[in-house]
Image (cartoon, grey):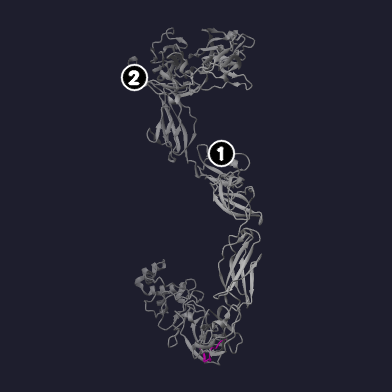
């Protein structure tokens, strides 16, 4: 419906009205007064089936609801007087019962009228006709006899039915099917059958044309036509000529919007080819199609540009024929702009337009309430100008329905448009509080459908505050809809539309929610899966959490088959994959607002199928060609073929790999060996694995021949004195090349003029020669032979006869002692003949005279000296030497004696602290397990360890060798002492053992001295006393009590050495001694002037208390190593430190 508003006092501004009166469509609410509007009507041409009731539709709306009446053939049709006619209640639809009546009686032109107090609407004129399927007229068809090669036309001439029938020709032979058509045989649009040239196979006695009438679903047939084609005087080849249309030109008229069909049927021999072109233009390819083997050109939805000359050309090798079809395009009336309903307020002006086109130009007539304007009551507010009606200053009560009728010789158009004069305050038709949901970056349309007269003005607000104006990102359409072209999350919120006219105001609230888009984060990937395995496609999705997603999987754009398909939250699993599972799988994630999808292919692979049809060709004694047909690759290309053979003569049942060829080959040239009964098979390999073996080929036997090779791995070695064992790897039956395989074994002593000795053996892999000299070189050969000759000349192998024990011992043995643990021995090697075998080396045997256990060192090769490490100091040894070969040891050399010098002793066997008292304790120890010389005595060193883990001065004591206990006095009570004890010989001190022990605690003194200088209460007391003395600093005293730091303490904190850690604050003590850490000095540790050192974490080895094992003590006996506690427990030294005193040390001195 059009709605316009223009206040004009008269007709002086008609042009302005015409330009400004274009309005948007409005829907009048049904609760308001309005003229009738036709909502449903039957088509203009209604062909009914006489077996069914006639139903003529006519529905309309209006307020009040309209009443209905009908005309038939231009006169009033009284429905109530005809018992066969029923008008549906509340409707104008007619139902005519034609059972038992002559249907022709109800044929005619019907028109429906809908009327209420505000106007009258009329329907189109509806032509009612009965469908007809008449019988074929009686006729007698003469038999047709023609010569082969001539053209022929069989006419159908079907009866005129309503609607026209569908024509087809049938082959009434046993197949009873439609007659096949081709370039030579054609059925044209009127149903006739054309032969461009006839052939003998066209002879038939029953060419029958059938007509099928679609409404009645009946089929009528023409009398059969008999055609006989003679070949006794055939027609010769000829140029093309047109059978239809005739002549050089023809004409064709078509209506706009219909389908243009042009036909060209040509005769000629051979059958001509047909082509099409349009003079002065191109054929409309998008709307054009060919049928009937290019003999029919169709152009759909014809327009004015499709008029012109169309040229069809028929061609064969003898020439060309052309025909021009002149096409004229006419047009029944069609709408340019149909009139639309007007809703006007009193005193407003409106316009109705009825713009049509057609060829020839249509005539336009106006009606009001079904009455021609010429015959209607005069209305001074109405002015008609051809296709326009202008209504000025309309008044209440002047509502009406106008009809526009446009017609030419090809048809008519008729439209109703009402003018409804109303004064109505605004109302919003869009439901309140509607929630619109859109996806980010998509358009959002917020509707504000309204009604009012005059037309309301629409304004929008966001969140009840911000006025929404036309402009990015908003567009307000003429119908009030708010358009957000690219919605973003920031656009979410509450929107209010307000409709206003001079009679009132109305508002409505809607809500916009902009959601996150649905996206597939992990798409399914292409899968190659072996048959019988499982395939898993992943499809992980992100979506707006407020939307409920639905995951759907498709296979090849269809539903998943039932059975082995398991759909999970974000994956699809296909179990026990089969070949039928191959295809494209698509996951689709749907929400109520959007969707996303992704696809991937599944390829099912398997091992190749076995090769088939093995065939042997080009057969010779030493080769054959094998061919085969590959099996199915099962979607995985064959990489290679493996050819195996079975030797049915020598190893039946065992298949051996022979050769491999590329996967693209289907033949292989095979090299063969003599005297083998071959059978071959083929295996194909792809990425999945090897196929099953093919069926074996036929057996192929090769002829015997002399051996091609001699035994391999020939060796000769003596296993005992006086023999030579010759061994080899025998030839296999496959390598024998013939029957009666033997080996001719030949040997002779090397570097002599002796002849070869030989022996033939069979079924053996070694031969033993006896009576040979001891360990002499021999030359050996092994030659293969069979009944068909000898193998190639064998190579010579060198070996030695059997060894015997050496005969002599090394002489002139000399020993040099380097130190207490190392000696060096020299000897004179034995002569080579006396070795009587392969020299392996010399064995040196030595032992201490007081100990029976013998030590052995072996020196490989032809040696004359060796070193003896690891000797025991201060010991007497016996030594002998023997020579070695593969057989064993020779006699021992005369025994030699040597002595090692003294060394440092081992550590004392133990060190224990016993009987601790207040100021003393007793130490006892045991002598070393190994004195390594004459024991001279013991050295004891000890030092105290205070409760800060610092080491005191070292005291040193020495003892005689026979002293093993000492009681130490003048010790501090409750003190930890560390003791270091070592044994001495004239060579020096041995390794140290350590021990730690406490003296007894004095009950009058705490076991651990508590340094009160580290106690919080004591520090506070001292600070208070100092501040009382310094009256001038009373302000600082107040600050201190509030938590301020002592000034000196602040300075210390600001310059504190980062390596020095504070005292423990929990108990005020220094860090305790511990020896569980690594043996490293503490960074930043200092040695005080009194000689004490901090204790480092260590074990009980005195060596570990310094930088190394040497220089443990100064000349005065003081211990140099640092002995400190854990790093986190370090603190400053006492007042002896060269650095400025800390507040804590100052307080210690104060006390």
Instruction: Please give the count of numbered marks on the rendered protein.
Output: 2
Q: Nearer the viewer's eye, disc 2 or disc 1?
A: 1
Q: In the image, residue 44 lies at what x, y percent?
A: 51, 14
* Residue 821 in view (yes/no): no
The residues colored magenta run 929-939
Q: Residues within 10 Å of mark 1 (few under 14, many from 20)?
A: some
Q: Residue at x 60, y 73 (%)?
A: 717
Q: In the image, residue 828 lies at what x, y percent?
A: 52, 86
Task: Identify the image quadrant of residue 743.
Answer: bottom right
Would you place residue 56 above or below residue 785 in this image? above
Q: Which residue is most to the left?
A: 12
Return the mark for residue 16. 2
Would you place residue 1080 above or below residue 911 in this image? above
Query: Callout 2: helix, strand or loop?
Result: helix
Return the mark for residue 554. 1
Would you place residue 906 above or below residue 1060 in this image? below
For the C terminus, give its image quadrant: bottom left
């Amino acid at each position: 419906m059009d709605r316009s508003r223009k206040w004009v006092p008269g007709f002086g501004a008609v042009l302005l009205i015409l330009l400004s009166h274009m309005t948007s469509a409005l829907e009048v609410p049904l609760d308001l007064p309005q003229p009738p509007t036709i909502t449903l009507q039957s088509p203009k041409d209604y062909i009914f089936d006489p077996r069914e009731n006639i139903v003529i539709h006519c529905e309309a709306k209006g307020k009040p609801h309209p009443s209905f009446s009908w005309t038939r053939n231009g006169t009033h049709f009284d429905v109530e007087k005809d018992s066969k006619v029923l008008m549906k209640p509340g409707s104008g639809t007619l139902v005519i019962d034609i059972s038992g009546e002559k249907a022709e009686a109800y044929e005619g032109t019907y028109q429906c009228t809908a009327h209420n107090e505000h106007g009258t609407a009329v329907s189109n004129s509806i032509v009612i006709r009965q469908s007809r399927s008449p019988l074929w007229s009686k006729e007698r068809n003469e038999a047709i006899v023609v010569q082969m090669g001539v053209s022929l036309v069989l006419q159908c001439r079907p009866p005129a039915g309503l609607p026209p029938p569908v024509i087809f020709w049938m082959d009434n032979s046993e197949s009873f099917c439609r007659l096949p058509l081709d370039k030579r045989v054609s059925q044209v649009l009127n149903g006739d059958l054309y032969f461009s040239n006839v052939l003998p196979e066209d002879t038939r006695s029953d060419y029958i044309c059938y007509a099928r009438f679609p409404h009645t679903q009946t089929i009528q047939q023409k009398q059969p036509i008999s055609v006989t084609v003679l070949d006794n005087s055939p027609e010769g080849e000829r140029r093309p000529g047109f059978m239809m249309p005739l002549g050089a030109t023809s004409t064709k008229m078509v209506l706009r919007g219909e389908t243009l069909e042009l036909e060209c049927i040509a005769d000629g021999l051979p059958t001509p080819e047909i082509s099409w072109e349009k003079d002065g233009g191109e054929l409309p390819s998008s709307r054009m199609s060919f049928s009937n083997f290019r003999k029919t050109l169709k152009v759909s939805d014809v327009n004015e540009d499709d008029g012109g000359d169309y040229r069809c050309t028929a061609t064969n090798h003898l020439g060309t024929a052309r025909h021009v079809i002149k096409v004229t395009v006419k047009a029944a009336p069609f709408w340019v702009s149909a009139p639309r309903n007007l809703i006007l307020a009193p005193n407003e002006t409106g316009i109705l337009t009825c713009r049509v086109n057609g060829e020839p130009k249509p005539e336009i007539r106006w009606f009001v309430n079904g009455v021609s304007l010429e015959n209607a009551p005069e209305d001074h507010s109405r002015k008609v100008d051809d296709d326009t009606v202008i209504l000025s200053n309309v008044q209440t009560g002047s509502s009406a329905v106008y009809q526009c009728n446009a017609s030419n010789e090809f048809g008519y158009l008729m439209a109703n448009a009402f003018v409804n004069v109303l004064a109505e305050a605004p109302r919003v038709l869009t439901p309140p509080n509607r929630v619109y949901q859109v996806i980010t970056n998509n358009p959002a349309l917020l509707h504000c459908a309204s009604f009012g007269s005059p037309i309301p003005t629409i304004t929008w607000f966001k969140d009840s505050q911000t006025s929404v104006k036309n402009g990015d990102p908003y567009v307000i359409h003429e119908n009030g809809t708010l358009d957000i072209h690219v919605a973003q999350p920031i656009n979410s919120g509450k929107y209010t539309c307000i409709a206003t006219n001079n009679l009132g105001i109305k508002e409505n609230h809607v809500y916009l929610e902009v959601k996150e888009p649905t996206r597939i984060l992990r798409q399914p990937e292409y899968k190659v899966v072996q048959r019988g395995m499982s395939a898993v496609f992943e499809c992980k999705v992100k979506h707006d959490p407020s939307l409920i997603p639905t995951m759907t999987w498709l296979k090849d754009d269809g539903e998943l088959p039932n059975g082995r398909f398991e759909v999970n939250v974000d994956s699809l699993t296909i179990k026990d994959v089969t070949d039928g599972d191959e295809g494209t799988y698509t996951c689709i994630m749907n929400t109520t607002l959007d969707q996303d999808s992704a696809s991937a292919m599944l390829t099912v692979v398997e091992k190749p199928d076995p090769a088939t049809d093995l065939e042997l060709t080009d057969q010779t004694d030493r080769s054959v060609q094998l061919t085969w047909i590959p099996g199915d690759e099962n979607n995985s290309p064959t990489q290679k073929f493996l050819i195996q053979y079975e030797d049915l003569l020598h190893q039946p049942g065992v298949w051996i790999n022979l050769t491999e060829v590329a996967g693209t080959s289907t033949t292989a040239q095979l090299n063969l060996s003599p005297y083998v009964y071959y059978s071959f098979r083929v295996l194909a390999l792809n990425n999945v694995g090897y196929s099953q073996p093919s069926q074996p080929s036929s057996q192929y036997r090769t002829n015997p021949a002399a051996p091609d090779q001699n035994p391999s791995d020939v060796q000769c070695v003596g296993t005992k004195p006086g023999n030579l064992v010759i061994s080899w790897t025998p030839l296999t039956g496959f390598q024998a090349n013939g029957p009666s395989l033997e080996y001719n074994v030949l040997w002779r002593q090397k570097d002599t003029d002796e002849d070869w000795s030989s022996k033939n053996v069979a079924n053996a892999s070694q031969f033993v020669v006896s009576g040979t000299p001891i360990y002499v070189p021999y030359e050996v050969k092994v030659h293969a032979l069979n009944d068909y000759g000898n193998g190639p000349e064998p190579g010579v192998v060198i070996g030695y006869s059997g060894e015997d024990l050496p005969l002599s011992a090394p002489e002139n043995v000399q020993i040099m002692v380097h130190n207490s643990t190392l000696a060096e021995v020299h000897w004179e090697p034995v002569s080579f003949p006396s070795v009587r075998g392969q020299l392996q080396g010399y064995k040196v045997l030595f032992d201490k005279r007081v100990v029976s256990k013998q030590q052995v060192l072996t020196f490989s090769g032809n040696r004359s000296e060796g070193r003896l490490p690891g000797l025991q100091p201060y010991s007497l040894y016996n030594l002998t030497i023997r020579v070695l070969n593969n057989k064993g040891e020779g006699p021992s050399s005369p025994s030699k004696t040597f002595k090692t010098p003294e060394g440092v002793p081992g550590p004392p066997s133990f060190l224990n602290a016993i009987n601790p008292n207040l100021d003393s304790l007793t130490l006892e120890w045991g002598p070393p397990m190994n004195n390594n010389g004459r024991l001279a005595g013991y050295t004891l060193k000890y030092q105290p360890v205070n409760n800060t883990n610092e080491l005191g001065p070292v005291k040193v004591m020495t003892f005689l060798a026979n002293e093993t206990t000492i009681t130490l006095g003048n010790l501090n009570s409750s003190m930890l002492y560390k003791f270091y004890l070592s044994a001495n010989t004239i060579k020096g001190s041995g390794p140290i053992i350590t021990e730690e022990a406490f003296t007894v605690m004095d009950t009058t003194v705490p076991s651990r001295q508590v340094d009160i200088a580290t106690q919080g209460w004591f520090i506070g007391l001292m600070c208070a006393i100092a501040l009382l003395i310094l009256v001038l600093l009373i302000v600082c005293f107040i600050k201190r009590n509030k938590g301020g730091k002592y000034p000196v303490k602040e300075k210390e904190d600001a310059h504190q050495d980062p390596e020095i850690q504070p005292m423990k604050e929990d108990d005020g003590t220094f860090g305790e001694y511990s020896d569980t850490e690594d043996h490293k000095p503490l960074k930043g540790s200092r040695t005080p002037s009194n000689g004490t050192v901090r204790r480092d974490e260590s074990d009980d080895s005195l060596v570990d208390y310094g930088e190394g094992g040497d220089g443990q003590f100064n000349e005065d006996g003081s211990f140099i190593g640092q002995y400190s506690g854990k790093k986190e427990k370090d603190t400053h030294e006492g007042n002896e430190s060269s650095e400025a005193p800390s507040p804590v040390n100052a307080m210690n001195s104060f006390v």
